[in-house]
Amino acid sequence: KAGVTQTPRYLIKTRGQQVTLSCSPISGHRSVSWYQQTPGQGLQFLFEYFSETQRNKGNFPGRFSGRQFSNSRSEMNVSTLELGDSALYLCASSLGSSGRAYNEQFFGPGTRLTVL
Amino acid sequence: AQSVSQHNHHVILSEAASLELGCNYSYGGTVNLFWYVQYPGQHLQLLLKYFSGDPLVKGIKGFEAEFIKSKFSFNLRKPSVQWSDTAEYFCAVIPEYGNKLVFGAGTILRVKS
């Protein structure tokens, strides 16, 4: 079974631009979560989607948004990029929406975003 | 809100040494616990997990962890490390019916050959 895939793997943008990252979950997984990983803040939860609905959101500004499609693929968008948005953005998928089916999450390789 | 504390940020060991990485969490209810590993240049991989039952869980590559509920701890152990264990290790916790995984800051392990 193929794992979680993320595209692109690397991105370089300049301040003020916007960016869209894509995540394809493991086949059959319906929940997709997004995380930001930085050396200073570690791994922080951004948001989670299930059945095309955002169920949970972390403490990030409104510039960070996402969506999920009917095939469970998800996109994350960051508008008006700032230098501090440089990070590894990780996507994780899980089978379901609660309990063990949600809690056990499988991670993709991440998208490395550099903002200049 | 729950939090996770990993005791050491950097650990350096020689091959064949024993490893124990500490993890403590703050949450009063039932939790699910995980250890993830991130090898250089690779993505996060699940090492082991605890949902319920036997508090001593075994994972891949000879790792094990013990859940001690009274101490809110979930320490990772390996009797004899190898150079290939060089990686960053993350402890993660989520309430049984919670809405987000909370990660510790990570421990960078370097194994000298």
Image (cartoon, coloured by chain):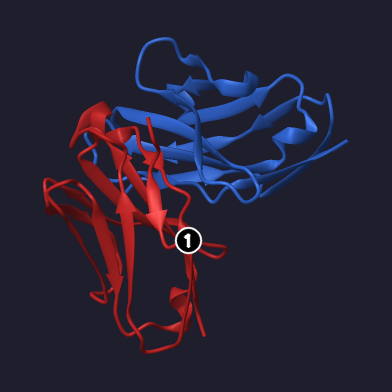
Chain colours: A red, B blue
**Residue B87 x %, y %:** 66, 43
SS category of the residue bearing label 1: loop
Q: Nearer the viewer, residue B111 or A18?
A: A18
Where B34 falls versus B8 (above or below)?
Answer: above
Where A34 falls versus B97 (above or below)?
Answer: below
Where A14 falls versus A4 (above or below)?
Answer: below
Where B92 falls versus A60 (above or below)?
Answer: above
Viewed as shown, does residue A56 lie left or right of B45?
left
The part of the image, by quadrant, that contains residue B18 is top right
The part of the image, by quadrant, that contains residue B112 is top right
For badge 1, the amino acid type reads Arg
Q: Is residue A91 visible?
A: yes
Q: Nearer the viewer, residue A42 or A5?
A: A5
The residue that appears at 27% across and 35% down in the rendered structure is: A27
Q: Quadrant of the C terminus of chain B?
A: top right
**Residue B60 x %, y %:** 57, 22
Q: Residue furthest bottom?
A: A16
The residue that appears at 29% across and 50% down in the rendered structure is: A33
**Residue A104 x %, y %:** 34, 32
The residue where tag 1 is placed is: A9
Q: Residue furthest top?
A: B54
The part of the image, by quadrant, that contains residue A16 is bottom left
**Residue B106 x %, y %:** 57, 48
Q: Nearer the viewer, residue B56 or A104?
A: A104
The residue that appears at 45% across and 87% down in the rendered structure is: A14
The chain to which mark 1 is attached is A
Q: Nearer the viewer, residue B7 or A54?
A: A54
Viewed as shown, does residue A87 lie left or right of B38?
left
The number of discs equals 1
Residue count near mark 1 (Cα–Cα under 10 Å), binned few <14, some 14–19, many ≥20 = some
